[in-house]
Amino acid sequence: MTGAETLDIATSGMWTLILVAAPMMIVGLVVGVVIALFQALTQIQEMTLVFVPKIIAIFITMLLMLPFMGATMGAYMNQIVDLIIRS
């Protein structure tokens, strides 16, 4: 295996990681900003108010995106297996 092939595998792995994690991270960011805006407008400074809605939103997003995440990771695994077989 050459250095270029190794870099291709690493790049593909990083893009797979970004694609799998991005939906949950974006939802967590949006929910956090909305709750922070609500807290700033109402001057409610309760620390635990942020965590429960974020956890619920991320969990629901994970359930909805599970087929996409599985397909993305499966495609990456197939690419790795093909490279192993060809070597």
Image (tube, rainbow, N blue to C red):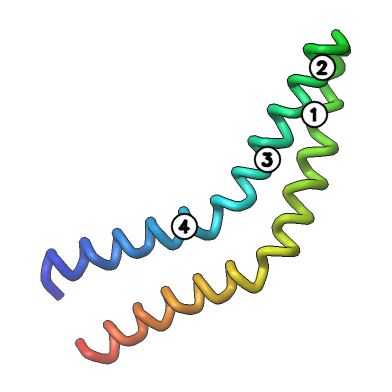
Element on which disc 3 rests: helix
* Mark 4 or 3, closer to the camera: 3
Instruction: Give the residue number, with chain letter if any, for mark 3.
Output: 28
| Residue 39: mark | 2
Q: Are marks 2 and 4 in contact (CB under 8 Å)?
A: no
Q: Amino acid at mark 2?
A: Gln
Question: Pointer 1: what residue?
Answer: 50
Q: Quadrant of the N terminus?
A: bottom left
Instruction: Mark 4 or mark 3: name the one nearer the start of the chain.
Output: 4
Name the quadrant containing residue 85: bottom left
CA distance separating discs 2 and 4:
32 Å
Nearest to the eye among marks 1 and 2: give it: 2
Name the amino acid type tagged 4: Leu
Chain-order first, disc 2 or disc 4: 4
* Precedes in sequence: disc 1 or disc 4: 4
Q: CA distance from mark 1 to mark 3?
A: 10 Å
The correct choice, above or below, for 48 with respect to 17 in the image is above
Q: Amino acid at mark 3?
A: Gly
